[in-house]
Image (cartoon, rainbow, N blue to C red):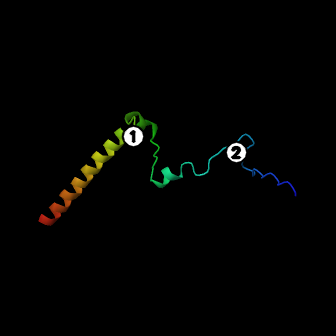
């Protein structure tokens, strides 16, 4: 029986990258649940220190947009 040849690393993979102890699918469940990551620009990140503050601001913006859309539709119906 012959020994199996070691798998080649490929041209793009440097020798210092070692994935021998990597876990396949480690974050698959979290990804499937719909986790979204958004990178903020540095000037925006200074204002929003955590995800809770970002979510609060986005929810407030959505409420304002929806209210504005509702009032615009109401004006169209009466005008």
Q: From the viewer's perspective, is residue 67 above or below residue 18?
A: below
**Looking at the rendering, which quadrant does residue 47 occupy?**
top left
Query: As drawn, which residue projects farthest toward the right?
Result: 1
Camera-side residue of 10 and 71: 10
Q: Which residue is drawn at 12% across and 64% down?
A: 78
Q: Residue at x 53, y 52 (%)?
A: 28
Residue 12 shown left or right of residue 41 in the figure = right
Camera-side residue of 2 and 57: 2
**Looking at the rendering, which quadrant does residue 18 occupy?**
top right
Camera-side residue of 25 and 79: 25
Residue bearing mark 2:
20
Where does the image place residue 32, in percent across and percent down from the top left? 48, 55
**Looking at the rendering, which quadrant does residue 14 occupy?**
top right
Residue density around tag 1, few if under 14, some if 14–19, many if 20 or more, within 10 Å? few
Residue bearing mark 1:
51
Q: Which of the two discs, 2 and 1, labels the residue nearer the N terminus?
A: 2
Please report contact status of discs 2 and 1: CB closer than 8 Å, yes or no.
no
Where does the image place residue 54, in percent across and percent down from the top left? 36, 41
Residue 19 shown left or right of residue 28 in the figure = right
Camera-side residue of 60 and 41: 60
**Alpha carbon of mark 2 to alpha carbon of mark 1: how far?**
34 Å
Number of marks in picture: 2
Q: Is mark 2 on a helix, strand or loop?
A: loop
Residue 79 is at least partly visible in this image: no
Q: Residue at x 44, y 53 (%)?
A: 34
Of the 4 image quadrants, the one containing the C terminus is bottom left
Residue 33 is at least partly visible in this image: yes
Where does the image place residue 53, in percent across and percent down from the top left? 34, 38
């Amino acid at each position: 029986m012959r020994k199996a040849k070691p798998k080649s690393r490929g041209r793009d993979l440097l020798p210092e990258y070692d994935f021998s102890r990597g876990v396949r699918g480690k974050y698959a469940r979290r990804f499937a649940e719909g986790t979204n990551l958004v990178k903020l620009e540095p000037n925006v990140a200074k204002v929003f220190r955590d995800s809770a503050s970002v979510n609060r601001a986005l929810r407030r913006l959505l409420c304002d947009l929806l209210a504005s859309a509702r009032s615009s539709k109401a004006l169209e119906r009466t005008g």
